[in-house]
Every structure is written in C-alpha cells, then in structure tokens.
C-alpha cells in the first residue's frame, strides 16, 4: 500500500507480480525506465532459472561432477550464498533445492515420508561443493538453486538500472520485496504496509522508508496443513523438514534487497531463536508469530 501520486508499471516475472513506481511527469523517461527494468529482470530470470535448460544454473547442475567456469556475476552470487551459509551455520544452503522434488507447498495435507527425505539428504550440503572462483563443481546428482537470492538481486539491479536513466523518486517491488531510490518528490517517505499473515488484506503494520530496501519471508502463501499443524515452505537442509517454531513472517529493512532478503530468510531458519538472531545482528526487523 503506497500513498502519493506516481506512475505505475506492472509485469510478471520470476513467478511473481513485479511493479515499478516512478514519480515523474516525463512520459518518455518513464517508458525508458519501465522497459529497462523489465529487460534486466527477464535477463536475470533467464540466466538463473532452474527451469530453463540454457540457464547458468542448469549448466552447472548438468555437469555431473565436472568443473564449470562461471562469469563474475554468477561468482558474486555464489560468494554471497557461501556467506549466507556461514552466517546461518549451514541453514541457508543453495544445494537444498533438490527437496522440492518431494515437497509441494500447495496448502494441502500431503507430506512426504521420511524415507523419501532420507533418499535426498546425501545430495545436500554446500560443503560438498567445490567452489574456487571462477570454477564450481557439484557432485553427481547435486544441484544449486538461486531461488533464495535471485529475486532480491533483480530488485537491486532494477533500481540501479533505473538510477542510470533518471534521478526521479522510484520504488521497485517484486512480490513484496522492494527498494526505493530516495524520498518521494515532496520529501516524504514511502509508506509500506506489512500484510497480515492470515491474508485477509488487513495491515499488520506500516513502515516509512526514505532509502534502502525491505524484504519479507514467511509462510502466508506457501505451506502445508495436516492434523492442525502448519508446515511452512522454508526447509531445514540438515533434516529435510520445515523449520519448527519459526515466525509466521519476518520483515527486514536493510541497505539492499539482497541483504534484507538474506536476513529475513536466515531469521526464519533460526526457528524459535529468530528474534534473538536479529537482535544479535543489529537488524531492523518485524516478526509476526
């Protein structure tokens, strides 16, 4: 929910609604910004989608133990993912995407059994990956998945691309993960709603942002429900099961969307210790349980 006068452009990418809000009276500049943002977003989606056989991710995953040389952009994302792995003590792990083969968070009550999970655990573990920039090698059967960082990276890149075209106030919002270029045209802050976890459309809180980014992780949209127990979609790579006693939602404010997304996800991964982790790291955050 945003207030004030602005120009809105909406498109769909990365399986999420994407929007760009720009405060300008120049329709030509606005069109340049909107097209540049969408082009850059689709470039990132195509490059890092696990669903495209021609993507960098698919090339790495299909190498079956052989070394793959990656470009500097991909190397940066791999280094960032390694930092997340270290900060989370192994809970943020981009090799855990293989678990999607047995987990489908569609709101149903269908859980995999322990034998299915056990059959995949040997394919999980960042420490099993050989990463020596610019070369990466996965053990046969292992995969990497940038699903936990690519969208947030795309938000940051979109803001940077737009900033190279205009200095007009701008907000980029991809599925609730967003960043702003600075204050609004009248000097006020952007108003960002924190949505209630029951998806009623109610507002849990209201943030005011003049610069930087906000990202949210939670189970409002992707979950399973069985025997009164809710299973959120963020999985523990060490057990193969959803994180226990996690907040329903964690919203983090940070300098970049990549940083905000990382911290919100790692906080969820801490389960009942989420708030303690955020406090220890000095992160501005809002937890809903």
Image: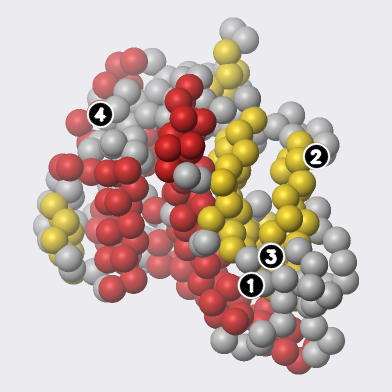
> How many angstroms separate mark 3 from mark 1 (CA)?
8 Å
Residue pictured at 76% horizontal, 92% vertical: 28
The reply to whether dot 3 and dot 1 touch (C-beta < 8 Å) is no
**Label 4: which secondary element:** helix
> How many angstroms separate mark 3 from mark 2 (CA)?
20 Å
Tell us which disc is closer to us: 3 or 1: 3
**Which residue is labeled 2 in the image?**
203
Of callouts 1 and 4, which one flags the residue occurring earlier in the amino acid sequence?
4
Q: Nearer the viewer, residue 28 or 79?
A: 79
**Which residue is labeled 3 in the image?**
210
Tell us which disc is closer to us: 4 or 3: 3
Task: Tell me where residue 160 appears, x and y as whole percent.
Answer: 54, 77
The quadrant in which the C terminus is found is top right
Using a 10 Å C-alpha cutoff, classify the residue at mark 2 as few (fewer than 14 neighbours), some (14 to 19) or many (20 or more): some
Tell us which disc is closer to us: 3 or 2: 3
Q: Nearer the viewer, residue 265 or 129?
A: 265
**Which residue is labeled 1 in the image?**
181
Residue 121 got which mark?
A: 4
């Amino acid at each position: 929910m945003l207030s004030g006068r602005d120009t809105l452009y909406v498109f769909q990418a990365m399986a999420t609604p994407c929007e760009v809000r720009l405060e300008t009276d120049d329709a030509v500049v606005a069109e340049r910004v909107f097209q540049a943002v969408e082009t850059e977003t689709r470039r990132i989606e195509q490059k890092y989608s696990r669903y495209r056989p021609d993507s960098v991710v698919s090339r790495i995953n299909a190498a079956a133990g052989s070394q793959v040389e990656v470009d500097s952009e991909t190397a940066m994302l791999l280094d960032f993912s390694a930092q997340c792995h270290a900060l989370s003590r192994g809970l943020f792990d981009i090799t855990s995407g293989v678990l999607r083969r047995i987990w489908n968070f569609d709101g149903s009550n269908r859980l995999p059994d322990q034998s299915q999970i056990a059959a995949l655990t040997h394919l999980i573990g960042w420490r099993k990956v050989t990463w020596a920039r610019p070369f990466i090698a996965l053990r046969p059967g292992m995969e990497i998945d940038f699903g936990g960082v690519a969208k947030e990276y795309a938000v940051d890149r979109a803001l940077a691309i737009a900033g190279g075209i205009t200095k007009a106030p701008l907000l980029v919002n991809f599925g609730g993960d967003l960043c702003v270029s600075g204050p609004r045209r009248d000097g006020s802050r952007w108003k960002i709603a924190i949505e209630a976890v029951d998806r009623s459309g109610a507002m849990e809180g209201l943030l005011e942002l003049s610069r930087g980014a906000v990202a949210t992780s939670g189970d409002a949209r992707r979950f399973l429900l069985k025997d009164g127990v809710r299973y959120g979609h963020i999985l523990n790579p060490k057990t193969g099961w959803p994180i226990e006693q996690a907040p329903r939602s964690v919203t983090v404010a940070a300098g970049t969307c990549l940083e905000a997304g990382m911290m919100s996800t790692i906080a969820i991964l801490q389960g009942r210790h989420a708030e303690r982790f955020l406090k220890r790291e000095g992160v501005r955050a809002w937890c809903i349980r």
